[in-house]
Image (cartoon, coloured by chain):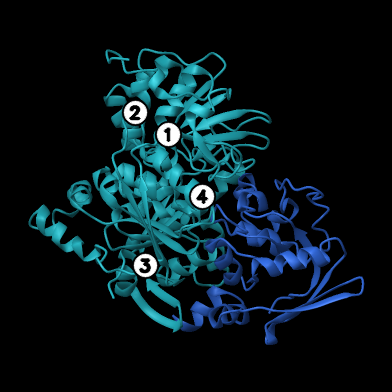
Chain colours: A cyan, B blue
Amino acid sequence: MGRTIVEKIFDDHRIDNPFEDVHVIRLDVVACHEITTPIAINDLVARGKDRVFDPDRIKAVIDHVTPAKDSKTAAQGKILRDWARRQGIRDFFDIGRNGVCHALFPEKGFIRPGYTAIMGDSHTCTYGAFGAFAAGVGTTDLEVGILKGVCAFRYPETLRINLNGRLPTGVFAKDVILAVIARLGVGGATNKVIEFGGPVTAAMTMEERMTLCNMAIEAGGTCGICAPDATTVDYLWEFIQAEYPDRDKALESFSAYQPDADADYADVIDHDVSGLEPMVTFGHKPDQVKPVAAMTDQKIDQVYIGSCTNGRIEDLRVAAAVLKGRTIAPRVRGIVSPATPKVYRQAMAEGLLSIFMDAGFCVTNPTCGACLGMSNGVLAEGEVCAATTNRNFNGRMGIGGMVHLVSPATAAASAIAGHIANADRYPAEGAQA
Amino acid sequence: MKNFSGNVLFLDRSDINTDEIIPAKYLTEITKAAMGPHLLEDLCLKGFVPGKSTRDKQVVITRANFGCGSSREHAPWALETNGIHVVIAASFARIFRQNMFNCGMLALELPEAQIGTLFDTFAAFETRLEMDLADSAFTLAAEGRRERCIFEISPFDRALVEAGGWVEYADQHY
């Protein structure tokens, strides 16, 4: 019987199989941020085990609330900062070099095909875009990961989703994943890895694949995963060129993490995207999704473009193309948060930040901020936000606030219109309407 | 091992997420105890009053996909600091379920129909649960009603609970 991608990765990393269906795997990356790590650090100190399994395999960033907004968040940052220094963790990213973890770490080349990674953050599943197994975990799993470099998982079943057809113009990876979550339901992939395949996945950039995999958790998935291919090699080439004589050899090596043709899937879903429209969530669950066209009477108070889902350069380009030469509605507060310093710098060089500012947006530093209602754009009671983020839970962006999840194009169009709107109303300057 | 018996809080909704169990704004706290007063603060559920409904409750019985969303272990800690060490549901989100056992607590799954019966029989009454972990069973009692339920718990999950959690287990084995 053939194996899926994640089965191959598990077989390569298993160090123990203490009980049937329990697999203890060795970890290539243990990633840490200032919200879920400090309690693990304090517990290790209290236990007299203040050490790490391998400082080079630990990556750490202050990203959720940065710069610190109050004494508590300052203390969290300090615990992580002091610990990184004490443990000799070289890949630690603080003010000026920090960004949203799931945008920053892939951009640094830390995630490779076949890797295993955990982080105390549910959107760690993003890294599956590289053909890695990456799972969000709690602080206890993180603590053991930091100390021992291992984590226990049930052998995950794989749900294969073939994205077929051709993505229409103006429809994006975000719309695809919202439609997939609507189809699966918020618990539809629980305890499963979602393996994305088919021609649409193959044609996607790494950033689009990250958007897909990022929201696997919103269907309950342990991880999203895409088979590594030439696109993966091209993205990683600057980081791996010393290890391979050429790109073909790298691709050949990564082909170890292709699923077998006779792999055993829990289910195979063929999902055609040819007729897909821009999508938007309603309600407080990410599987409550409908076409943007059916929601255009929804007024909004704020637009937020950023996060580990859609805060990368391609996202900012798409939003800026809609905003160029236009201004946002007077009633709307526009906030854009480039996800990393590299994205910020690139957006600046390409003139995107000027477009955002000319349109009336506020450009913030890279941070998770408003996505989870911690800083930089919390909603007041009764306010509505169109956001490129990943969760519309009740109170997520501030108690009593409502979040509608959309693509960067829809977010930009909604900012101009003052209500949920389709970007096809605002063709790029010079383009035919 | 922790105490697994006590009074039952029934939460009659599926897909209760970890933002509802403990809102993100409290994630800036760096002690587990600080979560205590904010348990289920953002849960909108008919008849549920945050701070009041959870008082003197040691067990939660709920529907499907409990604990979905964020990976925050602050959710089990918020339960733990309120003396709630058992959640019984039709299903759990993976990370929440693992976090419970990693803390030496119980996240027990029963078939959806059986959960439905428990709600029908007991949810309207002050109900007490007696845990018999050795026999993988618990008994619910209220107003002369009594029901013994058998559950499945994997050997690994049992080992975690007996060890006191994953840190303790991993320390012994790896």
Write down the residue under mark 1. A407
Residue A74 falls in image quadrant: top right
- Residue A341 picture location, percent across and down: 35, 36
Callouts 1 and 2 close, C-beta under 8 Å: yes
**Residue mark closest to the camera, 4 vs 3:** 3
Residue A302 falls in image quadrant: top right
Q: Earlier in the sequence, mark 2 or mark 4?
A: 4
Name which residue lies at 42% across and 36% down: A366
Q: CA distance from mark 1 to mark 2?
A: 9 Å
Asked if residue B96 can be seen in this view, the reply is yes
Residue B105 versus residue A44: which sits nearer the camera? B105
Helix, strand or loop at mark 3: loop
Label disc, if present, on residue A318 of the rendered structure: 2
- Residue A408 picture location, percent across and down: 41, 31
Q: Earlier in the sequence, mark 4 or mark 3?
A: 3
Q: Amino acid at mark 1?
A: Ser
Report the residue that reaches farthest toward the right: B143
Label disc, if present, on residue A419 of the rendered structure: none
- Residue A391 picture location, percent across and down: 53, 43
Name which residue lies at 58% across and 22% down: A299
Q: Count of labels shown?
A: 4
Asked if residue A243 can be seen in this view, the reply is no
**Residue mark closest to the camera, 2 vs 4:** 2
Q: Amino acid at mark 2?
A: Val
Q: Amino acid at mark 3?
A: Leu
